[in-house]
């Protein structure tokens, strides 16, 4: 596969009767308006380096679009259901819209084979909000870039990596026994195995995405989904200021009732400036934080089997391979990072398998020492190896932050792939948590793909954890960790 310019493209357009727009990197959602009598929202969407191909990898990229609304009376943000009939939504060439059966969003993607930039194209979505009083609502439209993972057979296990599965080819949705995957691992019929088609987020959750997530929560939910109290002083880091995390409290909350406003501010000064790390992968999360983000986005966690399909596609396993399909790897060192914290952050030399992981000479880390911009290694002319792209075009499946994947161990394999409903728990003890009871806790989630930090030690190197089939990192901790980020599927 010739990897195109796999840059991060997420945009948020906040709107109401007086619409305004926010853009980030290549995806733009602009010109938003609401027809209150028809219950529709209209906006223009555009993004760069889109594709749809009928040759390997025979897939396409898409944007998952969902809508939140705020009742002006209670100020609470809720998830807006959309029509489940694709014909109720409209757009123009070269795009098409697929509704989903639960109405939690739509997929927007190319209607025909082709590649290149999508110029500004109008999209109108029909909302389905119960007892709607649209005149009294504010709206926010969110877009997250995804890649399509087609249905079909694929293999897991590479025969070399630590704790790897026994090499096995998944050819359908039948149950998979321990004798096929390895001791202690099995996949019941309902467990998502990756055989059916699904979508994966193209990138890890970014700091901008997480800040916008926080900005739709209540005060108590914000307190649960961050470290600093929401009423902390303006300029307080929401997490730690270490490892490149720049989310700060822009406007403090108050009285445990008025939520805070969060923004990105890596380089102290104006919030959300061009070099404030909006496109840098979010880190310092816990599994509970990531699960809440996925539930709120109406996405779901991937499984370990799906992780390997996203990375490897239908190709035969290569012993010790990384997400880009080879065993070659080159570290992203701090001295090589260019345009730090901007939308064009990258690396100063092109090399196959450029990845963000930990390696030390003596006690000195020669890696980046922080999370970097999602898609940092790709350029306009990148192929799969030089973009360090997984088979279907997902980025940083090896390195940057750990991927959470529901395990085939007994602690996770009762998972059935239920997607999020766009809402979080409002129960006092769990306010701000994912409300999907069938999703596992941290013990049922394995860490995959490695991270930028690893175990700091003398002449250490955690590159082996980045291998597609490496399962040595085991289950996620219950607490937040500097190397934990996240990505969802649907």
Image (cartoon, rainbow, N blue to C red):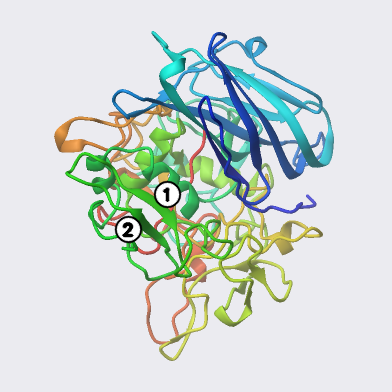
In percent of width and height, residue 47 lies at 71, 42
Q: Nearer the viewer, residue 314 or 116?
A: 116
Q: Nearer the viewer, residue 475 or 137?
A: 137
In percent of width and height, residue 481 lies at 33, 61
Numbered label attached to residue 211: 1
Extreme-front residue of the structure: 18
Write down the quadrant of residue 177 in the picture: top left
Name the residue: 67% across, 10% down. 87
- Whether residue 271 sits left or right of residue 150 in the image: it is left
Could you tell me if residue 408 is visible in this image? no
In percent of width and height, residue 325 lies at 67, 57
Mark 1 vs 2: CB contact within 8 A: yes
- Whether residue 156 sits left or right of residue 25 in the image: it is left
Could you tell me if residue 140 is visible in this image? yes
Residue denoted by label 2:
238
Neighbour tally class for label 2: few under 14, some 14-19, many 20 plus, Cα within 10 Å: many
CA separation in Å, label 1 and label 2: 9 Å
């Amino acid at each position: 596969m010739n990897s195109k310019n796999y840059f991060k493209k997420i945009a948020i357009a906040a709107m109401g009767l007086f619409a305004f727009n926010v853009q980030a990197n290549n995806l733009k959602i602009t010109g938003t308006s609401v027809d209150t009598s028809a219950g529709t929202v209209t906006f223009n969407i555009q993004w760069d380096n889109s594709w749809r191909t009928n040759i390997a990898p025979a897939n396409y990229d898409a944007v998952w679009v969902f809508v939140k609304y705020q009742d002006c009376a209670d100020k609470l943000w809720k998830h807006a259901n959309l029509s489940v009939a694709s014909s109720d939504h409209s757009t123009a060439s070269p795009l098409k819209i697929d509704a989903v059966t639960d109405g939690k969003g739509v997929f927007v993607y190319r209607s025909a084979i082709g590649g290149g930039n999508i110029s500004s194209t109008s999209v109108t979505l029909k909302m389905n909000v119960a007892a709607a009083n649209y005149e009294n609502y504010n709206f926010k439209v969110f877009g997250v870039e995804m890649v399509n993972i087609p249905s079909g057979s694929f293999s897991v296990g590479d025969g070399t990596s630590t704790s790897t599965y026994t090499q096995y080819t998944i050819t359908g949705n039948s149950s998979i026994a321990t004798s096929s995957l390895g001791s202690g691992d099995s996949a019941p019929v309902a467990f998502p195995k990756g055989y059916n088609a699904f979508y994966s987020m193209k990138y890890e959750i970014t700091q901008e995405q997480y800040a916008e997530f926080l900005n739709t929560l209540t005060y108590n939910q914000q307190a649960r989904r961050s470290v600093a109290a929401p009423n902390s002083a303006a300029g307080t880091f929401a997490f730690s200021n270490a490892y490149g995390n720049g989310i700060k409290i822009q406007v403090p909350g108050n009285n445990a009732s008025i939520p805070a406003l969060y923004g990105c501010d890596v380089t102290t000064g104006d919030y959300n400036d061009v070099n404030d790390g909006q496109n840098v992968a979010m880190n310092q999360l816990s599994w509970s934080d990531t699960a809440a983000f996925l539930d709120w986005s109406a996405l779901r966690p991937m499984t370990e089997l799906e992780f390997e399909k996203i990375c490897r596609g239908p190709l035969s396993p290569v012993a010790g391979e990384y997400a880009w399909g080879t065993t070659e790897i080159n570290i992203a060192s701090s001295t090589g990072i260019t345009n730090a914290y901007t939308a064009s952050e990258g690396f100063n030399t092109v090399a196959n398998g450029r990845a963000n992981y930990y390696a030390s000479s003596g006690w000195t880390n020669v890696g980046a020492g922080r999370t970097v911009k999602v898609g940092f290694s790709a350029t306009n002319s990148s192929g799969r190896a030089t973009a360090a792209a997984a088979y279907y075009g997902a980025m940083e499946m090896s390195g940057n932050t750990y991927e959470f994947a529901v395990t085939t161990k007994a602690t996770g394999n009762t998972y059935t792939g239920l997607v999020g409903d766009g809402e979080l728990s409002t129960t006092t003890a769990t306010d701000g948590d994912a409300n999907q009871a069938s999703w596992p806790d941290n013990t049922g989630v394995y860490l995959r793909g490695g991270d930028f930090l690893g175990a700091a030690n003398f002449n250490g190197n955690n590159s082996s954890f980045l291998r597609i089939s490496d399962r040595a990192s085991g289950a996620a901790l219950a607490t937040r960790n500097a190397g934990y980020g996240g990505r969802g599927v649907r």
